Image: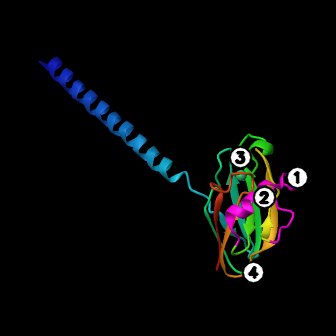
């Protein structure tokens, strides 16, 4: 009789132990999930540093896309814009640049003039419609330009590589 009692006791102890183990193991993955969802924090495109300079970080890849369709800065603000190409393709095949255009520039007509200017990095010889632009870069390359934000208003920015502007364009908003 005594041995049966001990057997039952030890069984119930064993049961409660495994039960506790189950609890702790089921708790852990739930905590991990929470960490995972908070991890991919999207870095802001514009970071204003302590000197008031707007640091703009534009990225592209072998897909014809900028990481943003909207950039917001302040009138007269100093701008340091870095364009990074995270892809692998050469600039002759999948080149990208950043071209900020003056107000009223017709995108399609500018893009066709740019496409014809292969020998000038796809910037038309007459660049009177351009406020600022980077050089054309290929996969794993990076380029930085500095300029001053124009007057308040809404401007267009594009990549002027042939046929890219349809996908690679956005609004440059000066407040
Ligand atoms: Cu492009």
Q: Is residue 114 magenta?
A: yes
Q: Residue 115, percent across and down?
A: 77, 54
- Badge 4 element: loop
- Badge 2 element: helix
Q: Residue 66, percent across and down?
A: 65, 55
Task: Please name the residue that numbered disc 3 is placed on.
Answer: 86
- Badge 1 element: helix
Task: Please name the residue that numbered disc 4 is placed on.
Answer: 76
Gap in angstroms between the C-alphas marked 3 and 1? 24 Å
Gap in angstroms between the C-alphas marked 2 and 3? 23 Å
Q: Which residues are magenta?
A: 105-128
Task: Please name the residue that numbered disc 1 is placed on.
Answer: 119
Look at 74% across and 58% down and name the residue there.
112
Q: Residues within 10 Å of mark 3 (few under 14, many from 20)?
A: some
Answer whether labels 3 and 1 touch (C-beta < 8 Å). Answer: no
Q: Which mark is residue 29?
A: none
* Disc nearer the start of the sequence (4/1): 4
Task: Judge from the rendering whether residue 48 lies leftward or rightward of residue 24; answer left or right.
Answer: right
- Badge 3 element: loop
* Disc nearer the start of the sequence (3/1): 3
Q: Residue 9, percent across and down?
A: 20, 27
Task: Please name the residue that numbered disc 2 is placed on.
Answer: 114
Answer whether labels 4 and 1 touch (C-beta < 8 Å). Answer: no
Q: Quadrant of residue 44?
A: bottom right
* Disc nearer the start of the sequence (2/3): 3
Gap in angstroms between the C-alphas marked 2 and 4? 27 Å
């Amino acid at each position: 009789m005594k041995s049966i009692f001990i057997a039952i006791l030890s069984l119930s102890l064993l049961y409660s132990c495994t039960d506790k183990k189950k609890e702790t193991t089921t708790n852990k993955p739930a905590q991990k999930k929470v960490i995972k969802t908070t991890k991919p924090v999207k870095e802001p495109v514009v970071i204003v540093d302590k000197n008031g300079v707007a640091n703009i970080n534009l990225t592209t890849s072998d897909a014809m896309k900028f990481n943003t369709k909207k950039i917001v800065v302040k009138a007269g603000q100093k701008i340091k814009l870095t364009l990074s190409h995270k892809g692998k393709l050469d600039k002759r095949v999948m080149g990208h640049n950043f071209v900020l255009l003056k107000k009223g520039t017709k995108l399609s007509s500018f893009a066709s003039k740019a496409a014809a200017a292969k020998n000038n990095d796809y910037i038309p010889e007459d660049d009177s419609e351009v406020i600022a632009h980077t050089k054309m870069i290929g996969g794993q390359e990076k380029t930085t330009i500095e300029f001053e934000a124009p007057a308040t208003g809404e401007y267009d920015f594009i990549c002027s590589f042939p046929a890219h502007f349809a996908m690679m364009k956005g609004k440059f908003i000066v407040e």
